[in-house]
Amino acid sequence: MTERLRARDLAFLTAETPASPRHNATVEVFDPSESGLDFDRLMQLIADRISFVPRYRQRVVAVPGHLAPPVWVDDEHFDLGYHVRRSALPRPGSDDQLRELVARIVSRPLDRTRPLWECYLVEGLEGDRMALLTKSHQALVDGVHTVDLGQLLLDTGPATKHLEPDDWRPRRTPSTAALLSAGVRDVLTDRATLVGTASAASGVAMRTADRATRPARTVAGVLTRRRRRSSSGSPFGPLSQQRRVITVETSLADYRTVRDAHGGTVNDVILATLTGAFRSWLMTRGESLRGVRQLEALVPVSVIDEELEATSLGSQIAPHFVELPVGEASPLVRLHQVSYSFQVHKETGRGVAANRLAGIAGFAPTTFHAIGSRVAFEQLRRGYQVSVTNVPGPQAPLYAAGARMEATYPVPPLVDGQPLAVGVTSYDGRVFYGITADRDLPDVEALHDGVLEALAELLEYSTTARAPRGRRTPGRGRRQSSRARGGVRTDGYDA
């Protein structure tokens, strides 16, 4: 029995273009030390656990004539060796070389004729380290029926959990006649299938129209971008087919220091840090901040809402829009403006504490980053300029095949009109930024130093200042967090 793609999942396939491949990626750095982690052990680990995500052995098959949405079918020629690949960096194996390799890999769309994922073991990093790059299509990971593979490969201890052997056998792919008859039946009897069919048809029509009108729209698009730039001051342009990846590692303790001195949450401090980094980057580019006072950011948040579909981890993800005050010179004013923008969300009582998410057994941030990118895609009509997905991870070490994970960097996808996306993950006392940028964005590497400098600036104002009366102090922070788990506080980084 086959399962038909839902309209939401189908949208990620129909919207995909060479300039905007619709997949999420994560880069994890491991210290293999005496664990023996190598390519063969990684293959065995994935083979042992892939049965928990059956869709990773399925491919998308279209219904002839697009009479109904495509279906997921077992890949009769599934080859784990195709999806799990081995790579190595030339000496010296620097982090810059790793980022360049990751940027080239995430720029390439996935093969639609096979299951929509890839995994790379990258050897040769400095310090005898290894990196694991996982790449999964947005249509594959919805957080409800399928979680990200990276979530299943990590253990809470160095001992690898051995599971029962998998006796999977692929089911035969339905014939053309069977696909047609099932498609007609579902369209006539199921409203969701009818909606999906209409969505697929409109997607095909839009792509056809796009090819036919592209020469005319090339000139019109330039004029439109010029008008938008003059009216809104947006510094962003269209996407190319290539990417850059910037990674930044910081200390979670620094964000707690700023929070304890000035109030708010760790999430507020992270967004204020990014605001400062964007500001310095725009100034490096020579952008006039008189025309760019704010950047509208989409920040997916975890909520409790009966009207939204729950993820497999018991939470829903909703969009939240924040104006990042890049035109403001004072780092403290930027922090308080960002904190105020989240106050309404906190007061609804719908928020889910970060420590509640990070405390779930087997929780890994990769699935929540995937869901956040889906939310960002679905909110394109709002015309925001950058997406920022901040996911709290476990504050204890995780392991893959006995090798300790030292760092984890999300690599979010880009969408048309937003050539910059940011993912943030806290893990084991550190905060890791993964920034995906279009390769044509000038001087975007300056965001690395911009994040460090913006955080240092906030720290400078925090270590010499007393917490104002009425705000939280370091001694009261943990107790308030435990009282506010009903939804007022969404920090949870005290855990």
Image (cartoon, rainbow, N blue to C red):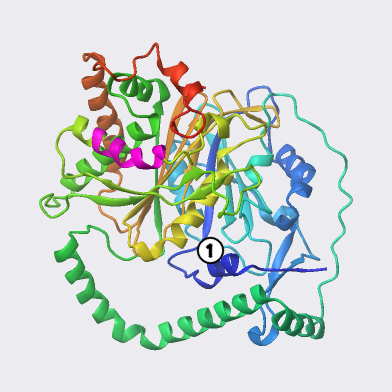
261 or 476, nearer to the observer: 476
Report how many numbered discs are placed on residues in the image. Answer: 1
Which residue corresponds to the image point at 35% horizontal and 56% vertical from the top-left?
439
Query: Does 203 appear above or below 24?
Result: below
Q: Is residue 397 left or right of residue 174?
A: left
Q: Amino acid at mark 1?
A: Pro
In the figure, residue 360 lies in which quadrant? top right
Q: Position of residue 253 (x, y in %)?
A: 40, 20
Residue at position x 17%, y 71% in the image:
227
Which segment did they paint magenta? 336-347
Q: Position of residue 184 (x, y in %)?
A: 74, 85
Give the prevailing secondary structure in the magenta stretch.
helix
Find residue 236 and report its horizontal and vertical position in percent. 26, 59
Task: Determine the secondary structure under disc 1.
Answer: loop
- Asked whether the viewer can see residue 69, the reply is no
- Image-based side of 400 in relation to 175, left or right: left
User: Is residue 375 part of the magenta span, yes or no?
Assistant: no
Q: Residues within 10 Å of mark 1 (few under 14, many from 20)?
A: some
Q: Residue furthest top?
A: 475
The reply to whether residue 401 is visible in this rendering is yes
Against 340, is 110 above or below?
A: below
Question: What residue does disc 1 label?
Answer: 109
Residue 192 found in image quarter: bottom right
Q: Position of residue 107 (x, y in %)?
A: 47, 58
Give 119 or 294, whichever is nearer the viewer: 294
